[in-house]
Each structure stands twice: as C-alpha cells, then as structure tokens.
Image (spheres, rainbow, N blue to C red):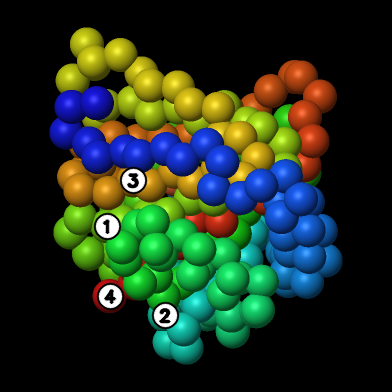
Amino acid sequence: MPDAEVLFYPCLFNAADCEQLFATLEAEIAWRQDSATIFGRHHLLPRLTAWYGDPGKTYRYSGISMEPLPWTPTLRQIKVAIETVAEVEFNSVLLNFYRHGQDSMGWHSDDEPELGPNPVIGSVSLGGCRRFLLRHKGNKSIPKVELNLTNGSLLLMQGPTQHFWQHHVPKTRRTVDPRINLTFRVIQ
Ligand SMILES: O=C(O)CCC(=O)C(=O)O
Ligand SMILES: [Fe+2]
C-alpha cells in the first residue's frame, strides 16, 4: 500500500483465549449506544461503544466527548499482548461491539489532533469475522484494499496511514456472529 504502513497478524490470540476474552468483555464492558450529531441532527451509531484508558485521556469525535473508564484486568492483558508486537505503549482503547451484520462503521481516518501526527492504532478483533476496507483519500486510481478481520487478529495501522487512507467496516446481509473490536491508541 502506498503512503501507508499496515501490518496484519491473523492469529495473535488462539481460539480458546478468544472465546474467553470475548465472553469477559461482552459481560464486563459498559457498552453504550451513542448518537453522533451530523448537521445538527442526532443519529444513533450503528454499534455499541466504550472508552477505557488512563485518567484524563478524553476522547472527542463527531460531537461526542468521552471520559475514559479505568482499565480492567482483561483490557490490560490484551494491551500488554499487543504492546510487545507494536512496540508502543498505548494509553487508551475505543471498543466497538457489532451486534449483527447491520452494525457497521462508516468511512473515516483516525486523525483527531489528540492522536498526534503519525498515530499507531492497534486494532484487535474478537468473534465474528467482518470485512475491513481501506481507500486512498487523494488518488482514486489506487485500488481499495480489503481484509477479513478474523477472530484473534491484530491490525496495526501506523506511519502516514491515517493522513492518506480511510477505512470502514461495511454492513452485510450475511448472518455474522457478534464481533468485538478494540482499537488501542496513544492520546497525547
Ligand atoms: O471495527 C473495526 O475493525 C474498525 C474500528 C475503527 O476503525 C475505529 O474504532 O476507529
Ligand atoms: Fe478507525
């Protein structure tokens, strides 16, 4: 991929660990359905979300401001596991719960100013496999890149990726298992 640094580890966690991590996170995370304000109108987000991290690492996007909840042992366990691969110390994590195929994430870049100039995003997937697409923002002749974010995988996006590329998780009419995604971040 030009103008990007994207690394994919299909099996960071084994099947037994994935099952246990999914069940714990599904039960213990304070999932909520937020609404985003677009042109002055409120829209429920098509997924559940939660924000955990070090105290004071406030996260703002689409008119939402989230104060982090404190790390749980399970979140710390996942954080430590991916930090050895990413060689970065993350201080916060945005969690997404895709309940079914109609839950999704629209095209965006993770380029909020508080993420700094070249953010490292460590994205862990648990549960149902979903398609993940990347498209170049400037040059439409560069083909889209498609990945299947499998159970137990880690996707690292770093370097200039967020400047030049957007990504999304499309809806699907297929029957898919619920999916938990954790995007670990460094808030400046
Ligand atoms: O669910 C995913 O794989 C993508 C999540 C994402 O892009 C985000 O939280 O910024
Ligand atoms: Fe993202």
Residue behind label 4 places its C-beta within 8 angstroms of ligand 1? no
Contact between labelled residues 3 and 1, with CB atoms less than 8 Å apart: yes
**Number of the label disc, if any, that sits on residue 157:** 3
Residue behind label 3 places its C-beta within 8 angstroms of ligand 2? yes
Q: Secondary structure at mark 3?
A: strand
Residue under numbered circle 1: 119
Q: Is residue 186 above or below residue 37?
A: below
Which comes before the other along the chain, label 4 or label 3? 3
Which comes before the other along the chain, label 2 or label 4? 2
Q: Could you tell me how far apart the alpha carbons at marks 4 and 3 are, in whole angstroms?
A: 17 Å
Residue under numbered circle 4: 188
Which quadrant holds the C terminus?
bottom left
Q: Could you tell me how far apart the alpha carbons at marks 1 and 3 are, in whole angstroms?
A: 8 Å
Quick one: label 4, few (<14), some, or many (20+) residues within 10 Å? few
Q: Could you tell me how far apart the alpha carbons at marks 2 and 1 are, in whole angstroms?
A: 15 Å
Q: Is residue 150 left or right of residue 159?
A: right
Contact between labelled residues 3 and 2, with CB atoms less than 8 Å apart: no
Q: Secondary structure at mark 4?
A: loop
Mark in front: 4 vs 3 = 3
Q: Is residue 16 above or below residue 32?
A: above
Residue behind label 2 places its C-beta within 8 angstroms of ligand 1? no
